[in-house]
């Protein structure tokens, strides 16, 4: 099994990195669980969209990126932020609307940006980040760096016209951009198939863009596919469209409790047979990369990280009221 | 003050739902389309029950394609249907302004009056939900700026139902703004058996008064009424008047009120600069000039992207305290 | 040869209809030539875009439609209007800004609409009519008529996001709409291939839409392909995407005189070897459907029609100044 | 009146071209993208020569994808470049308002000040070309309503060059409106060797006067100056003042001028209702209230979709005769 994990050259990851992938996924899951808990206790205001179930996409994609590569994210964006290297404390601070949050409390859950690691920000307009990330790729190309840029979006964004416009420009200009579609099969309360025509992959191939459907719950598959896309981008080979099949375990947002639009059986099937963390943990253990006690330590570490993050966020002061007028314009 | 003060109490959301339900029953050409409006009954449950009552042809879940939704609705409106398109958040108007402003607004005129556009676009406005900069705006001024559109801002369940019925029956594109913080607010509305509709272009005096006129729209009507109540305790008698529609704007009633009171505050939840308060203040300033004892005072949303943090967001929306303070300044006591 | 013309059952057209196709194409050509002449003499104000060279698309498509079927058109829309049955006099009146024009002088060249024959109007926003026509098809379906709706647009509109949004809805709802792309290989001064990625046809097939590339300079081919699409639409078979390859002979608009973005050789090749009128005339004559004297009569008739149209437009009064405030709102 | 009155005469179009050329030379991160801007040098030849000078990487012909163009430019602006995106007609703003208003305008604020957006969007405004309802609008009020954007309306070649240079050097999204009827108008501009830029937020007094203030934007500045000349012959001394930027708006200078003259007309080519004249009139009405001898008079475009027929279109735009008439009414002689 060990060999299998290491099979493709681009996916060769040593034990440390493999454990890190696991640890990152777990961090996202624990972060989301804690955030939902805090929300239920009205400690987080506004809107909250959990990415539990989708951790492998965020982690697998970002593991293939450098710090200076770009990403931008969505309303369901905590995982992407964490995977790209955000500090948990500053993230909680942002969710609380605190001064030490990534956006000084001005953005909140749907708008976390983190310039230090190329996170151009989460975006609350479905599809809104797609041209922006494509523009970052254009910029990378013009500046002759070998940076790549990743746009995360959901299956719902497949039907926003801006996707066509952006992908077309990326294709004609051979831009180093990766369109990372997280297909969790629902856009809010509407099943994807009901509102999405044709074979999704062809939205890329029809424009001559290398496209692939990937098991988004297998972090190594995500990593492998992304590495290929990153290589293509850095080599000047142009854009890639990756469709990651995955599932969100909870409701669309915190008010979506009953989820009448899908069955409990379907949820159970994803949770029990295809959970990205369970599957990866089992594989790591089988392959001898992780011992049960290492797993325990990771869990303990992550719990500590989350606890300290919440503490940091809690301690952080609210922004000064005057802050409201700051940053409307840059100097 | 046409709003009833007794009878059946329902929420703003229910009022809107009833208006759609009744009009769909009355006229088979009325239909509803939008994201999650059918099976889920809408994100705010505004369209609840419509799918069961009218079936999936007339209550359509769409893809997340706001420009497409609007354009399709327009094409249907030009060819015998009377669509009600829901744009989930008013902020998303940015995606559909071409279809609204360049297309829907101009079809009747450009075609020399041959095509009509009986189209309603329902959308939201209003901050306060900690939904941050892209889900909190009140962009009514954008559409009010465009000739050919009608723009409606109801402030009570009664008004919402009556104005939405008028919107659905109107042969022009109507943009209907619903303050999302108001959906659960209750108010008296006549029994469904009592048919009524509220004409466009008639301001509604929500409170009569003699010392100062507060012109307020949508969510700000309650803010104005709250302020007026406190002012009354202090001996300042404020008139609160709600234009109900920005286009057509009942300039005469607004001007008459100010001529009577000699002082005026305009409160609206859109950004203040180049917003609805500007137009209304300019109209008053020009037409009640010789009756004004003090400058018209405008109060819109603070001119900043709407911040997430409650301590910041709360400062951006006009509130009763601020209105009271402004009234004191204008009245001079 | 006669058989060849009549080959496919759906394209069976008797002599009268065949001559009518020719006559319509000629009418468009003469209309455009006259309009350009009038423009040069400053009798037509504003912007003017000639469709000379593209006549077969307009005529072949509209020949497959009923009066109650819908079309909407573009900035280059005179041909579509004429083919759908507009009166030449009222068209010139509109181009002159006169009261008896189709829009009472309010629309002009880029906005002619003609409700009586289902012409929803020309549109000066590239791609602007696409969702509108799709909505007309939705309306037809909801009203359970068997009308179809045709959206004409240029190759430039292929890169407007609204195309994806509209086609996707047409596909999921099986709407009776035909997307008629007039690929004249340039959007203003920019060659189509430079700004358009992939295989155009796949913008339809990727959404599961029946799609075909058609010789847009062969009026019978245009007619055949459209008839198939119309049949599909009327039968409830959903949308069709047709790409008509064609060429505009003149500049993008009247100010585009030198056309530096393309070669004289290329223009010559299209004009001399692929002219839709010449080709069709030759075929009709070869097949014995049109005698040289019949052809002459058609030319004479068309010239008369155009002359009378210009006269009508010229005689027509300007609108009453008060008209400016009328029709902002419908009653 | 900073505009030179002698020296080198160039057109408004050339001035804009020079500004871009010089800034691209100065700063390698500046680049241009838009439809037909490269090989063809732009529909109005504004970008002529740039492709030859700076090559196809920095002067890019795009597909007809306005929303995409704007979004790509935004992404490039956030990551080290300084794009100038051309949106061929201002009417097409309807297609890009999401990327402008929900994205570009809010990035700096939403990110807590960490990302800058040094982005210029050049587009057109202005009727009179018989281009009909979808190619003639002046939609400046839409963007002026949105906090986070700067909005520039130059009225002379000198201003156009100086303001565009400032726009390109600004670290915020700037929407730059060019009146297409002005492109061929000439004016004096310093030699290219004389470097200058015009700061935002400073109104420019185009003509000093004492009897009435005419605040005019873009195309309407010349209309105001023509009216002022005629008024001077009649003994009415009008001051003509051009805000140059709607955001930031130099309220102080406008107010001071009106305090001096006591009368004010505001002229702008956007639709009058909920347009730029409303904001400016409201600001004057509120802040010069005690100095006004007559109501502030607004003159915007007629509130109708802009018609094609010359006899109709010409009525929709404010003209010197109408300004003169309004001035007579206000001055009372
Ligand atoms: C342009 C736009 N339309 C609608 C919404 C409201 N909305 C927020 S999330 C969402 C569903 C998005 O679905 P998908 O892209 O599949 O992402 P997921 O929530 O499944 O992660 C919708 C409709 C929005 N935020 N932006
Ligand atoms: C949204 C939009 N963008 C740009 C323009 C300006 N414009 C008018 S026609 C045209 C080219 C259109 O090319 P195509 O669609 O191929 O049609 P063609 O002119 O070749 O018939 C452009 C860019 C416009 N009218 N609308
Ligand atoms: Mg989804
Ligand atoms: Mg073309």
Image: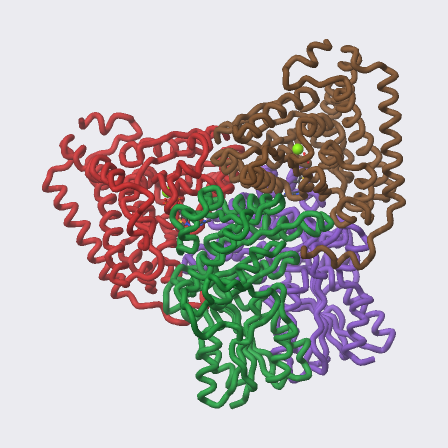
Chain colours: A brown, B purple, C red, D green
Image coordinates for residue D36, horizontal then vertical, percent? 42, 47
Q: Relative to the observer, which residue lies in front, C255 or D38?
A: D38
Q: Quadrant of the N terminus of chain C?
A: top left
Vertical position of residue C305 compared to residue D317: above or below: above
Whether residue B201 is visible = yes
Image coordinates for residue D235, horizontal then vertical, percent? 48, 90
| Location of residue B303 (image quadrant) | bottom right
Whether residue B54 is visible = no
| Residue shown at 69% from the left, 56% from the top | A328
| Location of residue C254 (image quadrant) | bottom left
| Residue shown at 74% from the left, 47% from the top | A107
Vertical position of residue C77 compared to residue A204: above or below: below
Image coordinates for residue C64, horizontal then vertical, percent? 33, 37
Left or right of residue B243: residue A135: left
Vertical position of residue C331 compared to residue A70: above or below: below
Residue furthest to the left: C293
Q: Relative to the observer, which residue lies in front, D326 or B126?
A: D326
Left or right of residue A282: residue A131: left
Residue furthest to the front: D193
Image coordinates for residue C176, horizontal then vertical, percent? 45, 36
Left or right of residue A331: residue D100: left
| Location of residue B331 (image quadrant) | bottom right
| Residue shown at 56% from the left, 55% from the top | D168
Counting the numbered discs, the total is: 0
| Residue shown at 66% from the left, 23% from the top | A222
Q: Relative to the observer, which residue lies in front, B280 or A71?
A: A71
């Amino acid at each position: 099994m060990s060999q299998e994990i290491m099979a493709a050259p681009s996916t060769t990851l040593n034990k440390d990195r493999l454990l890190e992938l696991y640890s990152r996924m777990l961090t996202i899951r624990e972060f989301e669980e804690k955030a939902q808990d805090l929300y239920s206790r009205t400690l987080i205001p506004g809107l909250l969209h959990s990415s539990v179930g989708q951790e492998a996409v965020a982690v697998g994609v970002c593991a293939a990126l450098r710090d200076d590569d770009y990403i931008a994210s969505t309303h369901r964006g905590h995982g992407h932020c964490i995977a790209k290297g955000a500090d948990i404390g500053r993230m909680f601070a942002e969710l609380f609307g605190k001064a030490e949050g990534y956006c000084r409390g001005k953005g909140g859950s749907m708008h976390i940006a983190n310039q230090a690691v190329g996170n151009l920000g989460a975006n609350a307009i479905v599809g809104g980040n797609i041209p922006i990330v494509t523009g970052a790729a254009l910029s990378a190309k013009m500046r002759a760096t070998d940076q790549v840029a990743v746009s995360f979006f959901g299956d719902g964004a497949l039907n926003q016209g801006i996707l066509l416009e952006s992908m077309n420009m990326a294709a004609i200009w051979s831009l180093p951009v990766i369109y990372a579609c997280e297909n969790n099969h629902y856009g809010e309360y509407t099943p994807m198939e009901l509102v999405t025509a044709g074979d999704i992959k062809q939205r890329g191939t029809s424009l001559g863009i290398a496209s692939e459907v990937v098991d988004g719950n297998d972090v190594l598959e995500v990593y492998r596919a992304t590495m290929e896309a990153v290589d293509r981008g850095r080599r000047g080979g142009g854009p890639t469209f990756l469709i990651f099949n995955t599932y969100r375990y909870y409701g669309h947002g915190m008010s979506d409790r009953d989820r009448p639009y899908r069955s409990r059986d379907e949820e159970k099937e994803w949770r029990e047979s295809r959970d990205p963390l369970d599957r990866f943990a089992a594989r790591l253990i089988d392959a001898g990369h992780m011992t049960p006690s290492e797993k325990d330590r990771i869990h303990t570490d992550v719990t500590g990280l989350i606890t300290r993050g919440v503490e940091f966020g809690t301690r952080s002061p609210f922004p000064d009221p005057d802050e409201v007028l700051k940053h409307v314009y840059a100097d | 003050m046409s709003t009833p003060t007794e009878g059946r109490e329902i929420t703003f959301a229910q009022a809107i739902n009833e208006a759609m339900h009744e009009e769909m029953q009355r006229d088979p050409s009325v239909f509803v389309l939008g994201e999650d409006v059918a099976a889920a009954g809408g994100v705010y449950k505004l369209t609840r029950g419509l799918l069961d009552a009218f079936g999936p042809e007339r209550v359509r879940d769409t893809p997340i394609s706001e420009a497409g939704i609007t354009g399709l609705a327009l094409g249907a409106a030009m060819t015998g249907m009377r669509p009600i398109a829901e744009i989930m958040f008013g902020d998303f108007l940015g995606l559909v302004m071409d279809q609204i402003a360049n297309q829907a607004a101009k079809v009747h005129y450009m075609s020399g009056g041959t095509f009509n556009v009986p189209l309603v676009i329902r959308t939201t406005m209003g901050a306060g939900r900690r939904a941050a900069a892209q889900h909190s705006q009140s962009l009514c001024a954008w559409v009010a700026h465009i000739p050919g559109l009608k723009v409606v801002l109801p402030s009570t369940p009664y008004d919402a139902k009556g104005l939405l019925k008028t919107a659905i029956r109107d042969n022009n594109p109507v943009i209907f703004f619903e303050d999302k913080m108001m959906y659960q607010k209750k108010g008296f509305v006549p029994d469904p058996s009592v048919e009524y509709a509220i004409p466009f272009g008639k301001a509604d005096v929500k409170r009569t008064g003699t010392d100062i006129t507060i012109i307020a729209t949508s969510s700000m009507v309650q803010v104005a009424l709250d302020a007026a109540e406190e002012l009354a305790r202090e001996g300042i008698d404020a008139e609160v008047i709600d234009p109900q529609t920005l286009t057509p704007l009942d300039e005469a009633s607004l001007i008459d009120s100010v001529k009577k009171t000699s002082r005026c505050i305009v409160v609206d939840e859109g950004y203040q600069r180049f917003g609805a308060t500007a137009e209304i203040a300019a109209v008053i300033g020009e037409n009640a000039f010789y009756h004004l004892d003090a400058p018209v005072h405008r109060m819109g949303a603070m001119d900043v992207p709407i911040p997430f943090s409650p301590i910041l967001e709360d400062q951006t929306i006009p509130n009763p305290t601020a209105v009271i303070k402004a009234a004191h300044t204008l009245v001079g006591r």
